[in-house]
Image (cartoon, rainbow, N blue to C red):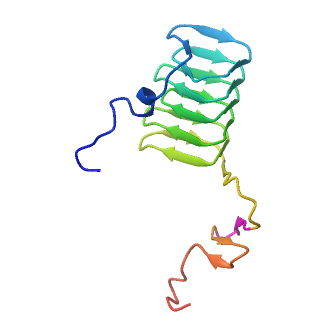
Amino acid sequence: MLGKSKPAGGAESRTRVGTLIGEGAVFNGDLSAPEAVRVDGTVNGNFACQKELIIGPTGQINGNISAQNVVISGSVEGDVAVSAKLEILSTGKLKGNITAKSLVVDENACFDGRCTMDSGQSSGSSFQSDDSGETYDSSAKTYGSKDVANPGA
């Protein structure tokens, strides 16, 4: 809307953080938390968070992540499964596979892996890709790209 802007810091400033792993801190082992967590240090192990996980610019996670929402502006090496939204900001780096309902990747962000979008619906509709890279909805038989050589098709 006109006259309104995002708060400085984006999603990070809207979340009440219950646990903070500070810059320079190193945690070795699996970690789980019931509230929102911000990581500015290093976690070597799997991470499960019931709410939002924010990985700051100096934050690093070496392990798999499971959370409701994840914001990455640091680095992650491992698979990420989110039930809602994953954001990789411009300074973020992710090396691993993603399973998410919603994905936002900023310009200059790094992502090396596979992505599976989970709509959370079981409507019987499935999107598939054939060897040509064309995607289509198998229930509606509609294709994701037009035939450029035959525009009327």
Residue most extreme to the left: 3
Q: Identify whether 147 is placed above or below 120.
A: below
Residue at the image point whose x is 49% and y is 88% from the top: 151
Tell me residue 64's x, y (percent): 70, 29
Residue at the image point whose x is 46% and y is 23% from the top: 57
Q: Identify whether 146 is placed above or below 129.
A: below
| The stretch drawn in magenta includes residue 73 | no
Magenta-colored span: 125-132
Main SS category, magenta section: loop
Q: Identify whether 118 is placed above or below 98.
A: below
Tell me residue 26's x, y (percent): 61, 9
- Looking at the rendered structure, the number of numbered marks drawn on it comes to 0
Residue at the image point whose x is 51% and y is 39% from the top: 87
* Nearer to me, 30 or 12: 12
* Quarter residue 127 falls in: bottom right
* Nearer to me, 116 or 120: 120
- Left or right side of 7 for 115: right
Quadrant assignment for the C terminus: bottom right
- Left or right side of 32 for 11: left
Tell me residue 131's x, y (percent): 70, 68
* Quarter residue 134 falls in: bottom right
* Nearer to me, 25 or 8: 8
Residue at the image point whose x is 67% and y is 41% from the top: 97
* Nearer to me, 3 or 31: 3
